[in-house]
Amino acid sequence: MTAHSTVSDILLDKVAEWLTQAALTGENLETIVRGFCERMAATGMPINRVHLTFSMLHPLYDALGFTWRRAGGLTIEGYRHVNEKPERFVQSPYYYLLSNNLQHLRRRIDLDGAIEFPIFEDLRKEKVTDYLAFVQTFGAGSVQGMMGSWSTDSIGGFSEDMIGALMRIQNHLAMAAKMAVLGRLANNMLTTYLGGDAGKRVLNGQIRRGDGETIRAALVMGDMRQSTVYAEKEGRQAYIDTLNEFFDAIAAPFNRNGGEIMSFLGDGFLAVYPCGRHKDPSKVACEAALSAVFEAQRRVSALNEERQSRNLSAVRYGIGLHVGNVMFGNVGLKDRLTFSAFGAAVNEVERLQSLTKKYATEVVASQAFSGYTDCEWGTLGEEKLRGVRQRFTVVSPKPATAASRVADIFSDAETDGLSEAEQVILLHRDAKKFESHLQVDRFRP
């Protein structure tokens, strides 16, 4: 690059206008970052690398990072919660800015000589000559904000006019990014606490008490056994850790293939597989739920082997399976609602789950559920469920049928190196596109 590339003020104004329009139309964060970087390069600004990191309020991630290169386009990184700050971040210009309460840091990158920050070694390889880092919050007292850096390989580095232009456009970028982050924040929180489908319904306006509909669904109720005894014996933190391990193992399979965790009930959970009212869609939903049951059993078995290696007791559980009509929507107080599934079928699946104690088996299903599957079932008996008029024939799957049903449906669960929980959140992109390039193992300033 030459020492004095010309930057068009008219095109810079167009970039600012585009950012404003992107904020108004609700563009996602990736679209904003990619479009911004490409438009900035088109103005004549001699940037060869831009890095932007946005803090996130999310149960798994601290921040989301974007790195744009003139020759390579955009890459995305998710920065997970850790107990200690990564060493690379502690040695970065960003940490220096935060530690010294500074907003900007500029450094010339020489071809030789001492390295102030490790990232400069990488920038040397990219022939960067000038580096400008910044920190910008999204408002007074806010923990949300962005950090970033501009790099150039121009022989003379950034001119004073260029730095002024970058500082001005930075505010427009912050405004558009803040709108995108807040929009994703609402989506993340609703998805995390309500589930994917319920979260979408709420975002689409289904927010009043009584809003909802009656749907048909395959239902799964799971529960951890002897949790009270474990909590009293091992203490609060050990119990919480065990409960999270239990949910990671047993509940995650039910958030796939048409299923959704509707709610966590103490040490149990309710999952639904919505379906049509005819035989074929009911069969699809029940088969998907049953395959998830077998995968959950495999995962809990692996968990218990791992717990045994830590001299911890095995986790035991019960699962009930049923199919029927449920009410799906908002109930509660006028100013304090919950979105979940309710109705007789939900009460019935809870009663079925409790029968796993009586029959000393991990899985109990209604005959109505088993009739929609190709599994071999063994009859346990006839039961009069509490609060239910008719008697139920209850069954349990024969063990020989379980192993062959898991591999095909769940074989892709670990191919990308992410946990089930991480696959659920799918930050800022649709799942297939985002999983192809999400990286979670480094923090590059």
Image (cartoon, rainbow, N blue to C red):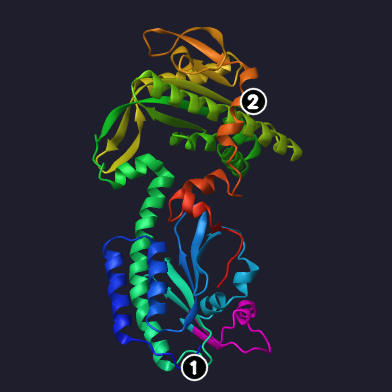
Q: Taking 356 as reference, is 159 above or below it?
A: below
- The residue identified by callout 2 is 403
Mark 1 burial class by Cα count in 10 Å: few <14, some 14-19, many 20+:
few
Residue at (58%, 46%) from the top-left corner? Answer: 419
> For numbered disc 2, what is the local secondary structure?
helix
The number of callouts visible is 2
Q: Nearer the viewer, residue 21 or 213?
A: 21
Q: Quadrant of residue 244?
A: top right
Instruction: Inspect the image, locate mark 2, and give the three-letter code of the amino acid beneath it.
Output: Ala
Q: As drawn, is 90 to the left or to the right of 394?
A: right
> For numbered disc 1, what is the local secondary structure?
loop
Residue at (47%, 53%) from the top-left corner? Answer: 433
> Residue 297 location in percent, x, y?
61, 29
- The residue identified by callout 1 is 3
Q: Are marks 2 and 1 in contact (CB under 8 Å)?
A: no
Among the two numbered marks 2 and 1 on one chain, the one whose residue lies closer to the N terminus: 1
> Residue 97 location in percent, x, y?
52, 79
Question: Which residues, given as a range, are shown in magenta?
Answer: 105-133
